[in-house]
Amino acid sequence: MKLSEEDLERINYLYKCFLDLLAQKFFSYSALTLKSALEFIHYFYSKLSTTTINTSNDNSLIIVNLLNNGILSLCGYRACRNTNAFLYDFLKKINLDPIFQCIYIDENNDWHIVTPIKANHLIVAINYNNQKYYLDLHNGLYFDSDLKTIVINKITIDIDELINNEILLEIKKIISKYVRYQEHGIKYIYTYD
């Protein structure tokens, strides 16, 4: 499935605008620390999950020309590549310096850092205050290189204006259109002048 050029340009612009709104809301709530950023995005994402129609780990929706899979997580497509791409984008927007980390989770549930070709899971890693952290919004796991867990405290902040924001609703509307196309076997929509 491919987005039309018009929809691709629009959705990338909307996603950037929505990340700007998230960052503004975060900075109005807290000073920048890794813990406060994780608490904020964890809370936002859990609230978003309760308002999204598709809340599955569905890997079937693939839009090949979509520049960022984080967009799909906002629409309920919760595959790790989508959810953790959204986390990555948020951390990047608030000027932390994340990287993607490819993981292989074996049959004993042990995690191994691997190359992308061998990976079966994608997380975000970050060096912060001389310590490496591994962050997995998809599973709600956050820990440092010594396996010390970052405890995410429940926060209360009014984010309804983000959940019901026109930008987010338009993103969902565009993605929903392509979900319907895919359900009908359509792979690309051509436009002619």
Image (spheres, grey):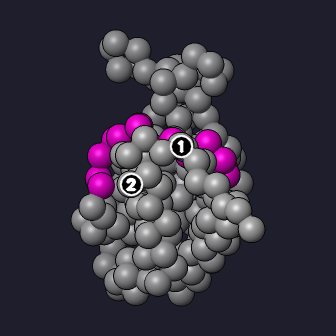
Q: Residue furthest top?
A: 107
Res. 102 image quadrant: top right
Residue at 44 percent across and 52 percent down: it is: 181
Residue at 71 percent across and 54 percent down: it is: 97
Q: Position of residue 157 (x, y in %)?
A: 36, 82
Check disc 2 and report the residue beneath it: 180
Q: Position of residue 172 (x, y in %)?
A: 43, 67
Please tell me which of labels 2 and 1 falls first in the chain.
2
Whether residue 102 is visible to the viewer of this picture, yes or no, is yes
Residue 64 is covered by the magenta coloring: yes
Which is the main secondary structure of the residues drawn in magenta?
loop
Mark 1 residue crowding within 10 angstroms, few (<14) / some (14–19) / many (20+): some
Q: Which residues are magenta?
A: 54-67
Q: Residue furthest front?
A: 193
Indicate the secondary structure of the residue bearing disc 1. Answer: loop
Mark 2 residue crowding within 10 angstroms, few (<14) / some (14–19) / many (20+): few
Using the numbered discs, state the Cα–Cα distance from disc 2 to disc 1 in whole angstroms.
11 Å
Residue 134 is covered by the magenta coloring: no
Q: Nearer the viewer, residue 145 or 42?
A: 42
Q: Position of residue 107 (x, y in %)?
A: 34, 12
Check disc 1 and report the residue beneath it: 187
- Residue 179 is left or right of residue 146, and the answer is left
Residue at 62 percent across and 65 percent down: it is: 7
Q: Is residue 82 shown above or below 89?
A: above
Indicate the secondary structure of the residue bearing disc 2. Answer: helix
What amino acid is at disc 1?
Answer: Lys
